[in-house]
Amino acid sequence: MTKERSLVRASEIGAWGFCQRAWWLANVQGAPHRNPQRLKQGTATHLAHGHAVVRAQRLRKAGLLLLAVGVILVILWLLWWGIGIRN
């Protein structure tokens, strides 16, 4: 994957802020990282967190939908019960 030089990622800004020399070595010189396993672990952790966030968003939407259906059913039941009392 080629890097688009006009695109600056937040992680690159963080790396540059932490150590400008390390950023330069990695992004300009293409030097390999000393601990690539740690980078893979960080990537996997971020990916797992992203999946958890997506799942939480879906569950929240489902909960709101179920709440709306419940409110509608309660309103319909109250209307039906109110009509039954009057007759």
Image (spheres, grey):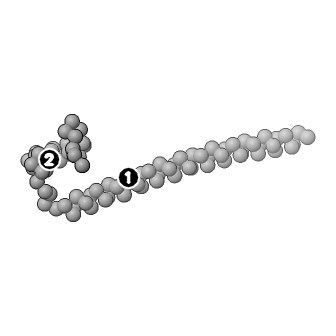
Q: Residue at x 42, y 55 (%)?
A: 52
Q: Nearer the viewer, mark 1 or mark 2?
A: 2
Image point (19%, 42%), residue name = 13
Residue underneath mark 1: 50
Q: Residue 63 vs residue 34: left or right?
A: right
Q: Farthest right residue?
A: 87
Q: Residue at x 61, y 49 (%)?
A: 66
* Amino acid identity at mark 1: Gly
Residue 27 image label: 2
Q: Image point 24% across, 43% down: which residue?
A: 10
What is the three-letter code of the residue carrying label 2? Asn
In this rendering, is residue 36 above or below 84?
below
Can you say whether 42 is above or below 2 in the image?
below
Quadrant housing residue 20: top left
Horizontal side of 77 relative to 17 (left or right) equals right
Kindly indicate the quadrant of the structure image that contains residue 83. Answer: top right
